[in-house]
Image: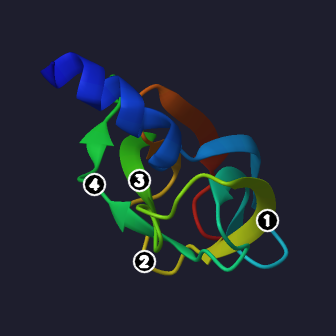
């Protein structure tokens, strides 16, 4: 009975956010991410939660993960939406870096961020 109840609740719950594109904008020093998500409204906001920097094979390049957080992650998945969001890289903990963006299980996108000029 428990699994049957869970199956009934799935269509009414929220769907996972995903990425359709992500890139580094050198002109603004921002990470530009196209988000795809479901909800009752298009007014979701997104922010980044940075992980710790890791050295990559003794080079000057670092690896760092950033979790993309949805302000309305529990919103009912009634309509599909897309939104392009810009994240300042003023708070990135290391450069140059291979940034791995994550949202929900299995949605991953990697972007290279150069060191500051």
Q: Quadrant of residue 8?
A: top left
Q: CA distance from mark 3 to mark 4?
A: 6 Å
- Front disc: 1 or 3: 1
Q: Quadrant of residue 32?
A: bottom right
Residue 24, image x, y percentages: 74, 57
Which of the two discs, 1 and 4, labels the residue nearer the N terminus? 4
Tag 1, which secondary structure?
strand
- In the rendered view, would you say 35 is above or below 91? above
Residue at horizontal 41%, vertical 62%?
74
Q: CA distance from mark 2 to mark 3?
A: 11 Å
Which of the two discs, 2 and 1, labels the residue nearer the N terminus? 1
Which of the two discs, 2 and 4, labels the residue nearer the N terminus? 4
What residue is disc 3 on? 66
Label drawn at residue 51? 4
Q: Residues within 10 Å of mark 3 (few under 14, many from 20)?
A: some
Label drawn at residue 50? none
Name of the residue lying farthest toward the right:
27
Residue 85 visible in this rendered orientation of the protein: yes
What residue is disc 1 on? 84
In this picture the colour scheme is: rainbow
Q: Nearer the viewer, residue 63 or 110?
A: 110
- The answer to the question of whether label 2 and label 4 lie on touching residues, with beta carbons closer than 8 A, is no
Asked if residue 59 lies left or right of residue 111, the reply is: left
What residue is disc 2 on? 91
Asked if residue 82 lies left or right of residue 74, the reply is: right
Residue at horizontal 78%, vertical 65%?
83
Q: Nearer the viewer, residue 87 or 55?
A: 87
């Amino acid at each position: 009975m428990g699994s049957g109840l869970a199956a009934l609740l799935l269509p009414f719950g929220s769907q996972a956010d995903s990425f359709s594109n992500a890139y580094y904008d050198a002109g603004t020093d921002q990470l530009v991410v196209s988000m795809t998500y479901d909800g009752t409204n298009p007014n979701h906001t997104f922010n980044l939660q940075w992980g710790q920097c890791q050295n990559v094979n003794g080079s000057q390049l670092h690896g760092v993960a950033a979790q993309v957080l949805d302000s309305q992650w529990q919103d009912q998945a009634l309509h599909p939406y897309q939104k392009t969001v810009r994240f300042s890289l003023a708070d990135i903990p290391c450069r140059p870096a291979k940034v791995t963006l994550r949202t929900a299980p299995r949605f991953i996108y990697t972007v290279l961020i150069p060191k500051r000029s």
